[in-house]
Image (cartoon, rainbow, N blue to C red):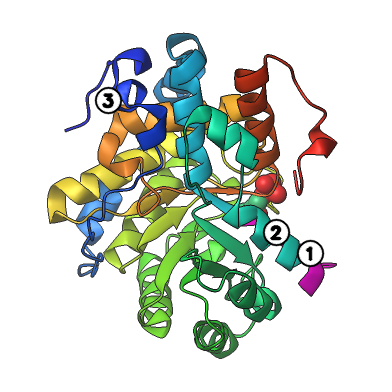
Amino acid sequence: MPDHGASLSQTHLSRTPLSQTHQVPQTVEPRNPGTALDMDWVLRARANRSAIERRAATLPGRRSVKKDFQAAWLARAVSCIDLTTLAGDDTRGRVARLCAKARQPVRADLLDALGLPHLTTGAVCVYHDMIAPAVAALHGSGIPVAAVSTGFPAGLSPFHLRVAEIGDSVAAGAAEIDIVISRRHVLTGDWQALYDEMRAFREACGPAHVKAILATGELGTLQNVARASLVCMMAGADFIKTSTGKESVNATLPVTLVMLRAIREYHDATGFRVGYKPAGGISKAKDALLYLALIKDELGDRWLRPDLFRFGASSLLGDIERQLEHHVTGAYSASWRHAMS
Ligand SMILES: O=C[C@H](O)COP(=O)(O)O
C-alpha cells in the first residue's frame, strides 16, 4: 500500500545506506496481459483539474530531502533514467558515447566517495537506425536498448508501416519499444480504435516490453489523459509514458498525478503493475526528486525501481552528477565537465 503522507526523510529509501540504493531486487513482475476494453470503466474516469493542479503545486513545499538522503534518492533516479538521444544528427559515435555514459553514469571517484560500487542507467533510448550501434556498445552490460517507434513522434505514417517498424526494431535488438498512440483516436473519443491500435502494437512487440507514449500535451484535457491511460493498459501496455519530448508541453506533475492514479486503479482492479515514464523537459535533479516523491506517495516503494519507473531524459543525468559532486566535494562543477551532460 502506498504510505501517503510519509515524509521523505522517514522513508525506507532514505534510511537505506547509500551503498545499497542501486541494488534492485530481482523480482520478476508478471507482464500486464491487458483486459477486454471496458467502456463503462473508461467513461467513468474523470479528472478534477483544479484539485489536481493544487496538489501538484503544493508538492515542492511539502517534500524535500537533504544530504545523504538526497544523494541516495539521486542515485536511484540515475538507475531509472532512459538515457536518450533522439536527434536528426545522431551518429554511431554519439550513440557509442551515450552508451559509455549509461555504463558509467557517475564518475568513479564520486561513486567511490558515495560507497556505490556499481551504477548504470535503466536503458538507452534511440531511433531505429541507432539500435545496432547501441546494442553493440552495451554488449555485456545488461542495459537494455529502447527504440522509439510507430512513426515517432507524430505517429501518422501508414498503420502497416508502424506495425512493421516495431518488428524491425525488435529484430535489430531493441528490448523495449516506445510507441506513439494516434492522438486523433483520443480527441474524437474513439476508444475502440485506440484499444485495437495498442493491441496490435503490443502483439508486434512480442517479448519486447512496450511503452505507450500518450503525448499528453496534445490530448486536450486531463480527463482524456486518464481515459487514454486506462485504454492503453487494458490493451496490454507495460508502461505508460507522457510524451515524446517533441510536443510543446511535455511531462508535468499534474499529468503525472492523473497517470499514476490510473495505474493505481488498474492495479487495484486487475492485480497487474504497469510502469510509468515521464519524458520530455526533465533536466534538473530537484525536479527528478519531485517525481520520485509523487510516485512514492501515490504508488509506493515498489514502483521506485527501473522495472516500473523510468525518466525519459537527455540532459537530466548531467545535473544529477553535478549535485552528487557537490555532495561529495562541497563544490559545484561546470556542466561541461560531465560527459554527455
Ligand atoms: O523520451 C525522451 C525525451 O525525448 C527526452 O526529452 P528531453 O530531451 O527533453 O530530455
Q: Is residue 204 above or below residue 124?
A: below
Q: Answer with left or right where residue 248 lies relative to residue 230.
A: right
| Label 2 Cα neighbours within 10 Å, binned few <14 / some 14-19 / many ≥20 | many
Residue at 41% across, 42% down: 22
In-front residue for pair 128/328: 328
Secondary structure beneath disc 2? helix
Mark 1 or mark 3, earlier in chain: 3
Mark 3 or mark 2, earlier in chain: 3
Disc 1: which residue: 94
Q: Is residue 170 above or below residue 291?
A: below
Instruction: Identify residue type, mark 1.
Output: Arg
Residue at 46% across, 15% down: 65
Instruction: Identify residue type, mark 3.
Output: His
Q: How many marks?
A: 3
Residue 248 location, x and y as percent? 71, 45
Q: Is residue 278 above or below residue 38?
A: above
- Is residue 290 visible in the rendered image? The answer is no
Cβ–Cβ under 8 Å for marks 2 and 1: yes
Q: Is mark 3 within 8 Å of ligand 1?
A: no
Residue 72 location, x and y as percent? 45, 28
Quarter of the image where the C terminus is located: top right
Disc 2: which residue: 98
Q: Which mark is residue 298?
A: none
Disc 3: which residue: 12
Instruction: Identify residue type, mark 2.
Output: Leu
Quarter of the image where the N terminus is located: top left
Residue 225 location, x and y as percent? 44, 47
Residue at 55% across, 62% down: 183
In-front residue for pair 193/127: 127
Secondary structure beneath disc 1? helix
